[in-house]
Each structure stands twice: as C-alpha cells, then as structure tokens.
C-alpha cells in the first residue's frame, strides 16, 4: 500500500504489512561470531594484533576453512587498508597466514590525480558492484574509521550514520560480511562498547562486536578476544586466546623477511571485560571477583551442578557475596541461567559441554543465557535476567532491505 500527498514530491510513503515480510535464517561467516550480510566491529588497543586477526580471517575465507557459511568454498576478500604498506606488511602477512593471494583484492580508487583510498559513503555504490561481480565473502576494513570521508564528523552520531548505514545496507543486500577494526579511546571505563573511538554509532550499527585485549596476567603475552555484542546470536560464547608468532617470508629478491602471524591457542574463561575491570580496580576488588567465581563453581558442584536462584543467592549472602558480583562472574565461570517448570523457576547451572577451538572447525556449544552487554540500538542495556535470547536462526526481510530483527521473550523468575 502506498500513499501520496503531493504528486510533485520525490518521496512517497510506503507501508508493508508484517504478513508480507519473508522470514529468513541468519547466515554466519564465522558460526555464531560474525554474521554474513552485516557489519562486525573488532575494537581494541593498538599493538595487540587486530590487523593480524583480520589477516587470519582473510586467509580462512580464501581457503574455505572457517566454520560457517563458506566452509569448504573459498571466497574472495576485498581488503581495504590505509595504515600499513602492502609490500612490506600486508602481503607478507597474508603469505604467512596461508591466504590464497589470488582471492585477496587490494582496493584503490582511480581519480584524475592518480590513486586514492576507498572513501565512504562516496564509493559505496561501486564497492557494492565489485562485491557482487566477484562474489566477495568478506570486506575487511583496516581500520574502518580511516575509510570514512574526511568531511564527516565521526564523533557525531547522525554524521557517522550517513557513512555506516549505506555500508550496512551494502552488506545486507550482497550477503557479504563487513569486518572493520576500531581503536579503544583512553577512557577508563570497563565497557568495551563505550571505549570505541568515535560516536556510539559505530557499535550501534554493527550487529556484532568482538573486542580484544592483552591478558596482563598471561606469562606468554597472549591476548583475548571476546564477543561483547551480538544482535543475531548468543553472547555466552567462550572467549578465545591467541598469541603472535614470528614467521619467515621470502621476498622478491630471494631474501627472507620476518613478519607476525596470529595463532589461536584455544578457549579461556578470561574475558576482555575481566581484563578491563582489573585494570581499573583495586587489587582487593580483583581478588574478591576471582573468589566469587571460584565459590560459584564450587557451590553448584556441591549441589549436583545446578541450584535454584533463591537458594544460591541465600548461600552467597551468607558468604558475603552480592548478587551483582555473581552477575559479573557467571559467564567466565561457565554457568548458564535458565527458567523451567511450572510455576517458572530460575536455575543456575554449570555448563558441562566443551566447545572446540576455532582451528578444529567444529561448531561451538550454544547454551542459552540472558545477554549481559549493551546490544546497541535495538537490544538490552546492562546486565539483566529479564530479557532472554530465544532464537538466533531467523531475521526479517523489512521492505527492500533484509534488516535483521531479534526475537526475545520475557522470562519470569
């Protein structure tokens, strides 16, 4: 149904009944972590391997080895980078990571005066055409901020959205995943999304955010990657630990150059939010959080692996542990919170499954727990037990754009 007020007007109101919306499954570039057809952000401090992660991801896509939509089917990648040299840094990194170089495309823009960097939103139309023609599975932006037109104030939400929303629509229309790197600002907050440099629009438009931080307690200097936002999938995914190794790559004159290579070493109970919280807390607070996590696991084990919320909180109170503290530690303690029975009862339960590491290609476990991070413009804000993720396999086709929507249901305690 359409309505028109002024025949000379260029804009016409269009109304679509919900019954005409096509329900479609969410597709994942990396199962449950990076959605295809959407923007994913990877923020963190400088010098912790974010670019090496993007290279690792590129290699996986060009070899068809990442568990997700393109597993077994190598796909092309458009790699937009502005801070590193292709000859000295990016190409050697791709070689070290094992990427198929014939499927990785450097992107430049020809102008009257030579070559320029890709600029958003100015070049979005031509970019969409290239993605479609090449069947691109991943658009890698290193960093995403540098692709935004210089005339756009990236600290103003409305201005930044004028560049990001067309990019998100490109991803939605083509099915290509867009993964952009971002930097943390110098704030002392423990909220990963608030730390992203620039307007809040970065984290709001992104459907998923995977934050990274160096684990200062790790003897091997490893870093941690945690899912801190996911509008389309679960948030209780285990964090991943990685290290950076040195690799030798042959150059054009036959000599060897040494370059960094990211290697995932497995899952970890530590999270980026744990690290950020420890960096901004007193030693006594860090110790109490660790003790609360240990107590929670010990108590649930003593109760056969699960306990009713009321019983657990009463026991915690006797030990001087607040519910708020338990809410901060239950995910790293690998505990899920579910409601069951009639009348409905909230149960805290140890997760006994052991998801595989990313190198195995196996799908991780999918326990159902309430979201604990800000989900952006359409999600919950802050820790809560009232909003529960119920279905990560569907999105809605809204008008011409297949904009995803979250299905949530309210759980009673």
Image: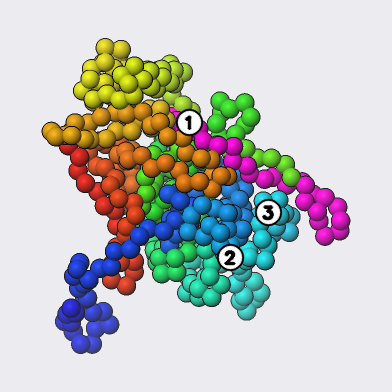
Residue 55 counted in the magenta span: no
Secondary structure of residue under mark 3 = loop
User: Contact, CB < 8 Å: mark 3 with mark 1?
Assistant: no
Q: Which of marks 3 and 2 is nearer the N terminus?
A: 2
Query: Residue at horizontal 50%, vertical 46%?
Result: 362
Q: Position of residue 110 (x, y in %)?
A: 62, 75
| Magenta region includes residue 272 | yes
Q: Of the numbered discs in the image, which one, if any, rests on residue 76?
A: 2
* Quadrant for the C terminus in the image: top left
- Identify the image quadrant of residue 49: top right
Q: Residue furthest top?
A: 318
Q: Nearer the viewer, residue 220 or 125?
A: 220
Q: Nearer the viewer, residue 300 or 322?
A: 300
Where does the magenta region start and end? 248-277
Q: How many marks?
A: 3
Q: Position of residue 11 (x, y in %)?
A: 26, 79
- Residue lying at the far left in this picture: please name it: 343
The relative height of residue 410 versus residue 171 in the rendered view (above or below) is: above
Residue 270's disc number: 1
Q: Earlier in the sequence, mark 2 or mark 1?
A: 2
Q: Along the polypeptide, which appears first: circle 3 or circle 1?
A: 3
Disc 3 marks which residue?
A: 98
């Amino acid at each position: 149904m359409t309505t028109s007020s002024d025949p000379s007007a260029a804009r016409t109101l269009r109304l679509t009944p919900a019954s005409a919306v096509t329900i479609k499954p969410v597709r994942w570039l990396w199962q449950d972590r990076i959605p295809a057809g959407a923007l994913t952000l990877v923020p963190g401090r400088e010098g912790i391997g974010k670019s090496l992660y993007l290279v690792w991801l590129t290699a996986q896509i060009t070899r068809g080895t990442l568990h997700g939509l393109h597993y077994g089917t190598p796909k092309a990648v458009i790699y937009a980078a502005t801070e590193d040299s292709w000859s000295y840094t990016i190409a050697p990194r791709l070689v070290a990571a094992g990427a198929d170089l014939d499927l990785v495309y450097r992107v430049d823009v020809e102008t009257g005066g030579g070559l320029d960097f890709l600029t958003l939103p100015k070049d979005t139309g031509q970019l969409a055409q290239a993605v479609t023609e090449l069947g691109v599975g991943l658009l890698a932006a290193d960093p995403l901020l540098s692709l935004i037109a210089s005339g756009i104030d990236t600290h103003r939400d409305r201005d930044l959205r004028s560049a990001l929303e067309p990019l998100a629509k490109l991803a939605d229309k083509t099915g290509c995943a867009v993964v952009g790197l971002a930097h943390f600002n110098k704030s002392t907050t423990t909220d990963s999304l608030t730390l992203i440099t620039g307007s809040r629009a970065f984290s709001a438009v992104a459907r998923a955010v995977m934050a990274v931080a160096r684990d200062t307690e790790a003897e091997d200097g490893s870093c941690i990657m945690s899912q801190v936002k996911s509008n389309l999938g679960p948030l209780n995914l285990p964090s991943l630990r990685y290290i950076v190794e040195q690799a030798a790559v042959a150059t054009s004159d036959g000599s060897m150059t040494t370059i960094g290579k990211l290697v995932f070493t497995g899952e970890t109970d530590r999270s980026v939010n744990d690290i950020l919280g420890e960096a901004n807390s007193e030693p006594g607070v860090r110790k109490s959080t660790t003790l609360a996590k240990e107590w929670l696991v010990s108590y649930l084990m003593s109760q056969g692996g699960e306990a009713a919320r009321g019983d657990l909180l009463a026991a915690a109170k006797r030990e001087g542990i607040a519910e708020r503290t338990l809410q901060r530690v239950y995910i790293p303690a690998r505990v899920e919170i579910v409601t069951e029975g009639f009348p409905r009862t909230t149960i805290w339960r140890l997760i006994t499954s052991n998801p595989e590491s990313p190198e195995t290609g196996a799908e991780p476990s999918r326990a159902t727990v309430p979201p604990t991070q800000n989900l952006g413009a359409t999600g919950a804000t802050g820790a809560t037990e009232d909003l529960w993720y119920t279905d990560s396999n569907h999105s809605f086709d809204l008008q011409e754009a297949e904009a995803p929507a979250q299905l949530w249901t309210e759980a009673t305690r």
